[in-house]
Amino acid sequence: MADMALSGLPALPAAGLPQRPGGGVTITERCGLGIATMQARHGQDASLRERIRQHFLLELPGRPAIVRAGSVSFTGIGPHHWLALSEGGGHVFSGSLRALVTPLASVSDQSGGYVVFRVGGPAIRDTLAKGFPIDLDPRAFKPGDAATTIVSHIGATIWRCDDGADGSACFEIALFRSLSQSFWEWFASSAAEFGCQWQGAVQQ
């Protein structure tokens, strides 16, 4: 039987998404990501960190933060618990990560369970402040910082990326795919006064 690769579909259909004139806020869906959760097994945290250090040449964050090496990133989402992303990795990524860290950690594929949105623009902090109960001021939430929290009763992990070319802040938000429509409805409503531009689903 021929191998059949799974291809990810956008969580949100482009048709029917309301937009508001203006360019205060932008939102993009990142498609094709390999996404997995990784949790160190009891007593294996130090060994896991060393394994990841040797293979990816990065240090797993010990706090809510994101670290990157090439196309792979790890975000701290809890004690000894990380969200791992690979650009273009798809469902294959979790298998390769599992093979690397077994028996030091448990890995679960989330490529079809999570969606990641990239948001930015001059008014992005004012928009996010309407739903995220955390301080996103640039002095408190710097590039590389992350938080696992809620937004409009939806569980989400948010991290700050490097600023955009125009100097405006940029964030990425990961949440359960099944809640993407609810998140979009909240986001579009919160960003309406500033102008909300849906930039589509970008294949990674």
Image: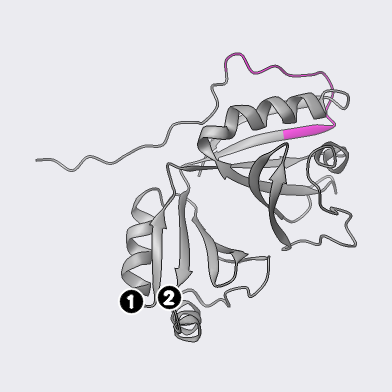
**Relative to 51, residue 66 above or below:** above
**In the image, farthest residue toward the top:** 16
Front-most of 52 and 184? 184
Q: Which residues are magenta?
A: 15-26
The residue positioned 43% from the left and 77% from the top of the image is 55
The reply to whether the C-beta atoms of the residues labelled 2 and 1 are less than 8 Å apart is yes
Front-most of 178 and 101? 178
Kind of residue sitting beneath label 1: Pro
Residue labelled with disc 1: 103
- The answer to whether residue 24 is magenta is yes
Residue 182 % position (x, y): 63, 28
Residue 47 % position (x, y): 45, 85
Mark nearest the camera among 2 and 1 is: 2
Label disc, if present, on residue 41 of the rendered structure = 2
Kind of residue sitting beneath label 2: Arg
The residue positioned 34% from the left and 53% from the top of the image is 92
Residue 35 % position (x, y): 47, 52
